[in-house]
Image (cartoon, rainbow, N blue to C red):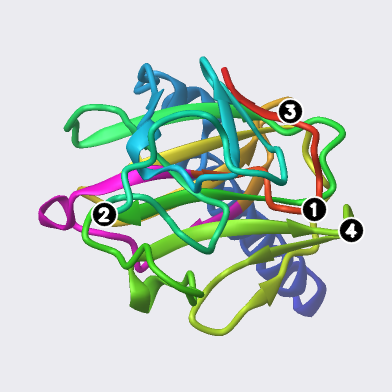
C-alpha cells in the first residue's frame, strides 16, 4: 500500500512537471512569435555619428560618417540606432550577429534619453541583452544578469505589448535566451534598438 502510494505521488509529480514544461514551451514558442514577423527599417537620424549604415546592416567605423547628422535626435555617446516596425500589438524580427564579439539588441522607448552615457535598463526605458567580449551574454535588467545560455549567431526578438514581455530567442534552434516580464505597455511606444558596439568592426544585419 505504501509503495503504491509513493508510486502514485511520483507519477503525479512527473505529470505536473510535464504539464509545466509544455506550458513553458508554449509560452516561449518561437514559431508562434514568428507569425508576428515584421519588416524593420533603421532610423538613420537616430544613429550615432560613427555608425555606418548600409541598408539593413550597420557597423562601427571609428570616425564620423559622411551622412548628415541629426544632432537633436541621434545617440551622441552610446553606439546605438533605433528602428521602425509600425505600431502592432505584437512584433517579431531577427538579427544576424554571427562572428560578433560585442553587440546590444532589444527595444527602447521612443522617449528614452539619447545623450551622454546611458544606463540601458528597464527603469530607463531600455529592454536589451548584451554580448561582451564574445563570452558574457547579459540581460540588462535593473540588476544586470549573466545568462547561462549559448552564444547565438542569430537572435529573434519578440515584443508582446498585451503580455508586457520582451523575449529573445536563438533564431537557429528556437531556444529561449531571456524574457523580460516587466516589459513596456502599448502606450510606452517602444522601438527596436541595435548596436554593433564600438570595439568590433564586423557588422550586424537585420534579416
- Is disc 2 placed on a helix, strand or loop? loop
**Foreground tag (2 vs 3):** 2
* Figure check: 107 above or below 13: above
Residue 43 place in picture, x, y as percent: 35, 32
Residue 4 place in picture, x, y as percent: 75, 67
Q: CA distance from mark 1 to mark 3?
A: 28 Å
Badge 1 is on which residue?
Answer: 199
The quadrant in which residue 133 appears is bottom right
Q: CA distance from mark 2 to mark 3?
A: 40 Å
**Foreground tag (4 vs 2):** 2
**Foreground tag (4 vs 3):** 4
Mark linked to residue 173? 3
Q: Along the polypeptide, which appears first: circle 4 or circle 2?
A: 2
Give yes or no for residue 71 being in the magenta stretch: no
Q: CA distance from mark 4 to mark 2?
A: 35 Å
Which of these two is toward me, 136 or 179?
136
Q: CA distance from mark 4 to mark 3?
A: 19 Å
Q: CA distance from mark 2 to mark 1?
A: 25 Å
Badge 2 is on which residue?
Answer: 72
Q: Along the polypeptide, which appears first: circle 2 or circle 1?
A: 2
Badge 4 is on which residue?
Answer: 135
The quadrant in which residue 50 appears is top right
Q: Along the polypeptide, which appears first: circle 4 or circle 1?
A: 4
Badge 4, how many Cα within 10 Å: few under 14, some, many 20+?
few
User: Is disc 4 in contact with disc 2, using a CB cutoff of under 8 Å?
Assistant: no
Amino acid at each position: 500500500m505504501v509503495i503504491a502510494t509513493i508510486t502514485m505521488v511520483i507519477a503525479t509529480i512527473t505529470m505536473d512537471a510535464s504539464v509545466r514544461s509544455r506550458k513553458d514551451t508554449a509560452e516561449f514558442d518561437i514559431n508562434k512569435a514568428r507569425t508576428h514577423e515584421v519588416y524593420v527599417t533603421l532610423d538613420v537620424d537616430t544613429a550615432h555619428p560613427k555608425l555606418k549604415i548600409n541598408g539593413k546592416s550597420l557597423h562601427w567605423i571609428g570616425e564620423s560618417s559622411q551622412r548628415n547628422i541629426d544632432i537633436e535626435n541621434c545617440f551622441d555617446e552610446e553606439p546605438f540606432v533605433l528602428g521602425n516596425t509600425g505600431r502592432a500589438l505584437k512584433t517579431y524580427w531577427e538579427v544576424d550577429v554571427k562572428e560578433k564579439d560585442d553587440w546590444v539588441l532589444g527595444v527602447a522607448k521612443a522617449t528614452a534619453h539619447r545623450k551622454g552615457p546611458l544606463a540601458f535598463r528597464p527603469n530607463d526605458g531600455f529592454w536589451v541583452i548584451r554580448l561582451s567580449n564574445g563570452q558574457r551574454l547579459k540581460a540588462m535588467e535593473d540588476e544586470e544578469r549573466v545568462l547561462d545560455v549559448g552564444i547565438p549567431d542569430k537572435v529573434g526578438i519578440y515584443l508582446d505589448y498585451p503580455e508586457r514581455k520582451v523575449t529573445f530567442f536563438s533564431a537557429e534552434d528556437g531556444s529561449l535566451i531571456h524574457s523580460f516580464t516587466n516589459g513596456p505597455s502599448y502606450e510606452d511606444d517602444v522601438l527596436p534598438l541595435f548596436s554593433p558596439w564600438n570595439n568590433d568592426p564586423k557588422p550586424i544585419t537585420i534579416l
